[in-house]
Image (cartoon, rainbow, N blue to C red):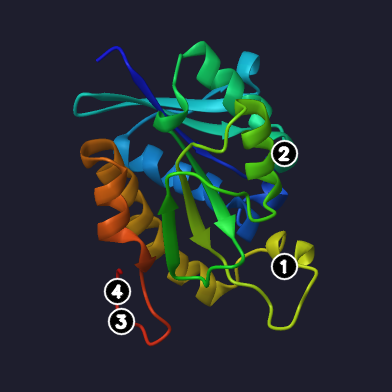
Amino acid sequence: MDEWYLVAGLGNPGPQYERTRHNAGFLLADRLARRWQADWSWERAFESRLARALRGERRVLLCQPQTYMNASGRAVAAVARYFQVPADRILVVVDDADLALGQIRMRPGGGTGGHHGLESVTTHLGTPSYPRLRIGIGRQPGAREITAHVLAPFGPEEWERLQAVLDRAAEQVECWLEHGLARAMNLYNGWVQSPSGRSEAT
């Protein structure tokens, strides 16, 4: 019971970013806090909003760094150090333009895929070996520059579809906490809802 788990949803603070694609990590953290009836508090020492929850025998910290995306690692590492959370119990949630909206993918570690939030977390933790959950946001066909796309709000149809994605991703996080990474990956990675509207997971 003494050990903490940390779920860090990455995004940008401020109302202008609330429903943007780049804030998929924040949105999942908010969804988890509602599911777990956990209350957010501003923690100046960690430059973060934190919420605490008990999931079975697991004590869980939800974290929304308030540093802006590119410096997320500073906040995540500060929380991890203070609560003595090892890298394998830190789950970082981010948006992924290389996955279509409707897909989620959990991995035990690996590269950053050019995601500046993951780059910052990897730098400040000093290792790439921490679990991460990528939430697909898609990209504009043929566009090489994606900044405007990721910082734009989800469209109405996208927002509606995202709700099922966030519910499924929340279930995957809960599976990770209860049953471990391998089972969570096997049961939930893939399509939450395919373009045809069918619910799938592979």
In front: mark 3 or mark 4? 4
The image shows residue 49, relative to residue 182, as above or below, that is above
Pointer 3 and pointer 4: residues touching (CB < 8 Å)?
yes
Q: Which residue is mark 2?
A: 68
Q: Which residue is mark 4?
A: 200
Observer-nearest residue: 97 or 65?
A: 97
The answer, for residue 12, to whether it is visible in the render is no
Pointer 4 and pointer 1: residues touching (CB < 8 Å)?
no
The type of residue carrying mark 4 is: Glu
**Element type where label 3 sits in the image:** loop
Q: Residue at x 68, y 42 (%)?
A: 119
The alpha-carbon separation of the residues under discs 3 and 4 comes to 6 Å
The type of residue carrying mark 3 is: Arg
**Element type where label 2 sits in the image:** loop
Residue 198 image label = 3
First of labels 4, 1 by sequence position: 1
Residue 72 appears in which quarter of the rendering? top right
Q: Mark 3, residues whose alpha carbon is within 10 Å: few (<14), some, or many (≥20)?
A: few
Q: Mark 2, residues whose alpha carbon is within 10 Å: few (<14), some, or many (≥20)?
A: some
Residue 37: x and y in percent read 32, 34
**Element type where label 4 sits in the image:** loop
First of labels 1, 3 by sequence position: 1
Pointer 2 and pointer 1: residues touching (CB < 8 Å)?
no
Residue 166: x and y in percent read 41, 57
Q: Which residue is mark 1?
A: 149
Q: Residue at x 48, y 37 (%)?
A: 130
- On screen, residue 56 versus residue 5, left or right, reads left
